[in-house]
Amino acid sequence: MRVIVLGSAAGGGFPQWNCHCKGCRRARAGDPAVKPRTQASLAVSADGVRWVLLNASPDLPSQLRDHVILHPDHDGPARNNPVAAVVISGGDIDCIAGLLTLREGHEFRLYAQDFVQAILNGNQVFSVMNPALVRQESLRVNEPVALRDAAGQSLGLSVEAFPVPGKLPLYQEAGRDLAALVSDDSVIGLSVKDEAGHRILFIPGCAYVTPDILTRAQQADILFFDGTLWQDREMIDAGLSQKTGARMGHISVSGEAGTMAAFSALTRTRKVFIHINNTNPILCDDSEEAKKVQENGWDVAYDGMEVTL
């Protein structure tokens, strides 16, 4: 199985277009220790020819352009592309906006929860995805599904969705009290497995680590996990928001209740932070925080990072 990190940043990318925090300033200035990043998405393939996207970020057009392996086949028909399927982990704009890029006469299968399909089918903008070309398949938690292309051919991969603590998408928050924002079906993690038994976990958003997540991580070859914020009050302290990380549905990287502590006993599985907010100092390779995650056995994802299992 081959995995390409198409994007590694949280919503807004890095540098974020309207942010002048220290990290964004350094990235704009071309500082080699601070790599620009697009919004989080993976491309996965069992054969290196047909690819499955895990989430379709708003930055998908540039991500497709930047990776030659995702370009059309010159020997194929006038319009073609190796993207054979898309699997969605939630209803946030970060996860679904890129679907509008795939509207131009391209056949693929779209795998998503009923919750997400209702969002797509209830919004006229997404009707540009021709249902004659884009077949929607339902993802149900704890039920592995064999991934197939638009013609029904096996892609050599299976995916299993599983519950992850999280909250409703931001655009659905209006009029709801805080307790109502938490939904059992609003966020899922994705476990992708090839026919040789190699397994990756993709959890770009998570409020806290459950025993089930720990067990699944122990069984995986590589874990791509929510690295949004270094600490819970990060956005508040930076003067950029009034929300804590917990309020946004994201566990912190650091601290006694943070990700590094939660996965401290996980030594066999490779651990990679993804979906990293522009305020998080681990985006700066020369920061003390980046050094600390390395010391704790974690990598920080970057656009173009590749893993072969």
Image: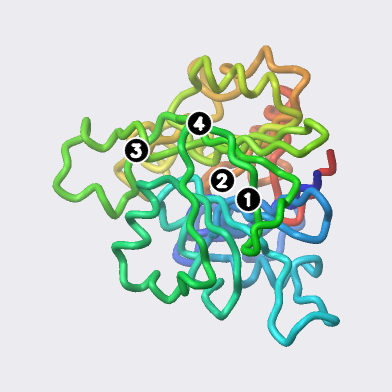
Q: Mark 4 points at which residue?
A: 162
Residue 163, horizontal then vertical, whole percent: 45, 30
273 and 229: which one is in front? 273
SS for tag 2?
loop
In the depicted view, which residue is nearer to us: 154 or 42?
154
Residue depth check, mark 4 versus mark 3: number of the one nearer the observer = 4
Residue 158 position by quadrant = top right
Of marks 2 and 4, the one in the foreground: 4
Residue indicated by mark 3? 167
Q: How is the image coloured?
A: rainbow
Tag 1 and tag 4, C-beta contact below 8 Å: no
Q: Are marks 2 and 4 in contact (CB under 8 Å)?
A: no
Q: Earlier along the polypeptide chain: callout 2 or callout 1?
A: 1
Instruction: Tell me the CA gap for discs 3 and 2.
Output: 16 Å
Q: Which residue is drawn at 56% across and 71% down?
A: 102
Determine crowd level at label 4: few under 14, some 14-19, many 20+ residues with C-alpha closer than 10 A. many
**Residue 72: image x %, image y %?**
76, 76
The residue tagged 1 is 8
Amino acid type of disc 1?
Ser
Along the polypeptide, which appears first: circle 4 or circle 3? 4
- Are the residues tagged 2 and 1 within 8 Å (C-beta)? yes
* Residue 217: numbered disc: none
Q: Find residue 275 and name its label.
A: 2
